[in-house]
Amino acid sequence: MRTLPLIIAAGLMAALGGCNQAEEMPEAKPIEQQIGAGGRPVGTPWSRSPVYSSNGMAATAHPLATQVALDILKAGGSAVDAAIAANAALGLMEPTGNGIGGDLFAIIYDPASKELYGLNASGRSPAGQTLDQLKQQLGDADSIPPLGHLPVTVPGTVDGWFAMHGRFGKLPMRQVLAPTIDYARNGHPVAPVIAMYYERNLSAFERRMETTEFEFDNARATYFANGAPKAGEIFKNPDLADTLSRIARNGRDEFYSGVTARVMVDYLQKQGSAFAMEDFAGHTSEWVDPACAAYRDGYELCELPPNSQGFAALQMVNILKNVDLRQWDRGSPEVIHYITEAKRLAHADVARFYADPTFSALPEELLTEAYGKQRFDLINPDKVTPEFMPGEIEIAPKLEGEGDTTYLTVVDGNGMMVSLIQSNYRGMGGGLVPDGLGFMFQDRGELFSLDPAHPNAYEPGKRPFHTIIPAFVKKDGKPFMTLGLMGGGMQPQGHVQVLINIVDYGMNLQEAGDAARINHDGGRSPTEPLDGPAIDPLGTLNVEAGIPEATRKRLSAMGHQVELVENGVMFGGYQAIARDPETGVLTGATEMRKDGQAQGY
């Protein structure tokens, strides 16, 4: 366990008048001897109360974004209006995880039609660049780098906003974007966890500059003019205010064929990119059908199809329904072993089959209960399996990394429910900020495979494999809960862990997110060659400190590569809202690993 840093202790003591700089500081005591958490009159001691309301609710990764969403609801906006407003605010306030240079996915429940709608607002590679041309630019590299122009794909977020707004919006877009424009121009105080991620991103960019050439002056001027912004520091982004003002005034086409598009394309071409104006003008989002997998007790988890990894969570559900986890305690090695092996099995298939369905359709067998049982039978209950191969399923004819993301959810008084996730992928993105626009391009194209035989191989005008996934839960066939959990490959296994916490162990929404999590990292990857060996077939089982030491030791004895991670950064960030179908009462939750807030009215 870490001890309190002496520099912090010194500052505290000086502030309290306990000593001065000339006095010798007492030795810092072990953390177990320091003051700990207080108690709770109800519920588990390591969580807090969920939030209840009945007129509307929002849960986001930043308290100010949550308030922006509530203000839009109170002004007569729909849950979609409020979600767009919150997402715009987060692009300003949490650029370490998202922004209009990235992509968006959403699941929307519409109470008028009583239907669940999915939106895939992810962008594509340049239409004028082949795999061979890309490889010529890569030289000896065996993968697409995370920096510069090569991993850039068309940003899909703005088109996604207007697709949702055109179908379900009530307020004009200028009103929806107005709060963020104001915050961008006049400033907002930086939140603590986001400040930490600013520092991590700047350090990563500077480290990579030692070996990789890419344009960073614009990014430095926009985000790091005085170093990484600190918690409580007022941050302004007038360039982003101007960009959002043009979008609010001129609509979706401003971003894809207007002045803003021209600036983006000119900038990218100066970096050597193959993008042309036609790539942006021709971009469209796609309405898709979510699929659901029944777990138990009437609960169904619903996710979006590829090119996202959402169906991996459904595959895990179909595997885990074959064992009753309730026979063991939640923190037992048996439960964690089964969750981990189910994740590894599902992701072996992710690496083999998941890709842009326009180019390669997903085999239908993957989501059947029979296939889930077949995969479950491969799990040895007593020890880890060194490597899981993908299922022996024929690929239909041609037709993971560390991800930083934001997830938000909004439910309005009419029962419209929005589950929305948005990201630039690795960190803040690829380091490129187009001249005077105030946002960074995503580096999502890093997730293409360079193996021409792979379904996820790079091709012109293609969407790469995607990690970000919103989720939705039904109960007894009725809409019940929106949820999401940020962070690359953590997301599908995080969705399943939250579902297990609620369904099998009776946790409330807040406890289900605060409970200690695991994050299995490694295994097969959709960027690796199709027929080659996996780089890291066993992977690493990262666990939080709340997983008992005895469990960690037993998992190691079973063959897992267990790592204890105590700072929470590998385990995502969770938001959720549940709606009682009988009373309309809303229950919301966020969690300690982020700066966020769930609030209603």
Image (cartoon, grey):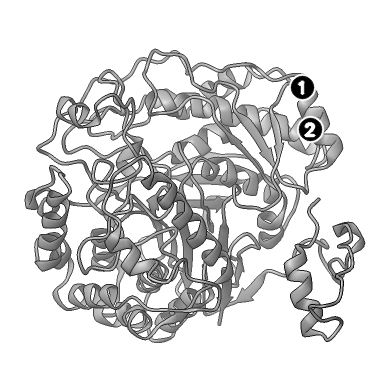
- At horizontal 66% and vertical 27% (from top left) the residue drawn is 322
What residue is pinned by disc 2? Answer: 333
Marks 2 and 1 sit apart, C-alpha to C-alpha, by: 9 Å
What residue is pinned by disc 1? Answer: 558
Secondary element type, mark 2: helix
- Does residue 416 sit above or below 461 in this rendering? below
Quarter where residue 420 is shown: bottom left
- Is residue 100 shown to the viewer in this render? no
Front residue (pair 29, 69): 29
Local packing at callout 1 (Cα closer than 10 Å; few below 14, some 14-19, many 20+) is some
User: Quadrant where the C terminus lies?
Assistant: bottom right
The amino acid on which the numbered mark 2 sits, given as a three-letter code, is Pro
Secondary element type, mark 1: loop
Residue 244 is situated, as x and y percent measured from the top left of the image, at 25, 74
- Is residue 394 shown to the viewer in this render? yes
Residue 119 is situated, as x and y percent measured from the top left of the image, at 32, 52
